[in-house]
Image: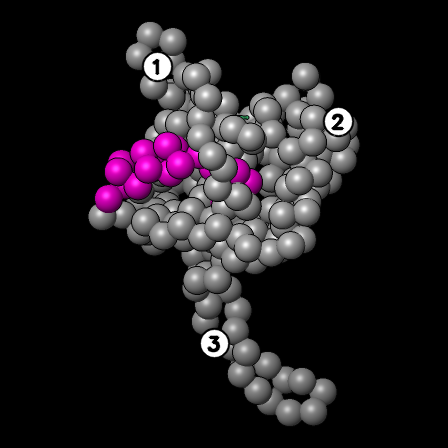
Amino acid sequence: MRVHVADHPLITHKLSVLRDKSTPSPTFRNLTEELVTLLAYEATRSVRTVDVTIETPVATTTGVAIADPRPLVVPILRAGLGMLDGMVKLVPTAEVGFLGMVRNEETLQPDIYAERLPDDLSNRQTFVLDPMLATGGSLIAAIEYLFDRGAVDVTAICLIAAPEGLAAVEKATQGRDVTIVLGALDEKLNEVGYIVPGLGDAGDRLYGTV
Ligand code: URA
């Protein structure tokens, strides 16, 4: 597993405003979108391309186009939805699928309650959007699901991760082509599964249900 923690003052600045509990939802949503666009730039560094011939007003030259099959972007509902606009702003030709996950209160494992993905994921480069990598449970389930459906590599874009969650994803995905791109790697998880210092519940802060 490759982990890339963004090291850029603009990202750290925007994350600091996002963490502030007095930042209202509209600002939180805008900043999330901006942050994802910045992280997506890093996350798409290995996106597959093909050479194309183009005519400039002056000469014929070779450029590149994003290769088929198009990259697939999969926000994990609900909070991952707040990251989608920032991602497709940078990769407008990407296809978008959806995964809804909920914790099964009996097994304590994440269950997929909603799924809207292309039938054939074989050979797909896939980008999962999930703002908070806390215990890693839902991200692991999403990554396994996508590989089972034929994806060839999965890159997860997260705003903030806890070391415990990162270690869990690493352990569960050994031998797979997995990359995690983070805005920040925080200190720890607290006893109720929140990232410390974190930013609270990302879904609530995005959608104003605090
Ligand atoms: N999910 C969140 O939204 N925030 C956390 O701190 C942990 C999980």
Residue named by callout 2: 22
Quadrant of res 24: top right
- At horizontal 42% and vertical 47% (from top left) the residue drawn is 180
Specify which label sits upstream in the sequence, 1 or 2.
2
Residue named by callout 1: 108
Can residue 175 be seen? Answer: yes
Residue furthest toward the left? 175
Extent of the magenta region:
157-174
Tell me if mark 2 has few (under 14), some (14-19) or many (20+) residues whose alpha carbon lies within 10 angstroms of its own.
Answer: few
Pick the quarter of the image with the C terminus: top right
Specify which label sits upstream in the sequence, 3 or 2.
2
Q: Position of residue 202 (x, y in %)?
A: 60, 28
Quadrant of res 147: top left
SS class, disc 3: strand
Query: What is the three-letter code of the residue carrying label 1?
Result: Leu
Q: Is residue 41 left or right of residue 141?
A: right
Is 138 situated above or below 42?
Answer: above
Nearer to us of marks 1 and 2 is 2
Query: What is the three-letter code of the residue carrying label 3?
Result: Asp
Q: Position of residue 139 (x, y in %)?
A: 40, 33
Residue named by callout 3: 51
Q: Is residue 79 magenta?
A: no
Q: Position of residue 170 (x, y in %)?
A: 30, 41
Tell me if mark 1 has few (under 14), some (14-19) or many (20+) residues whose alpha carbon lies within 10 angstroms of its own.
Answer: few
Query: What is the three-letter code of the residue carrying label 2?
Result: Ser
- At horizontal 31% and vertical 12% (from top left) the residue drawn is 107
- At horizontal 68% and vertical 17% (from top left) the residue drawn is 209
> Mark 2 vs ligand 1: CB under 8 Å?
no
Q: Is residue 172 magenta?
A: yes
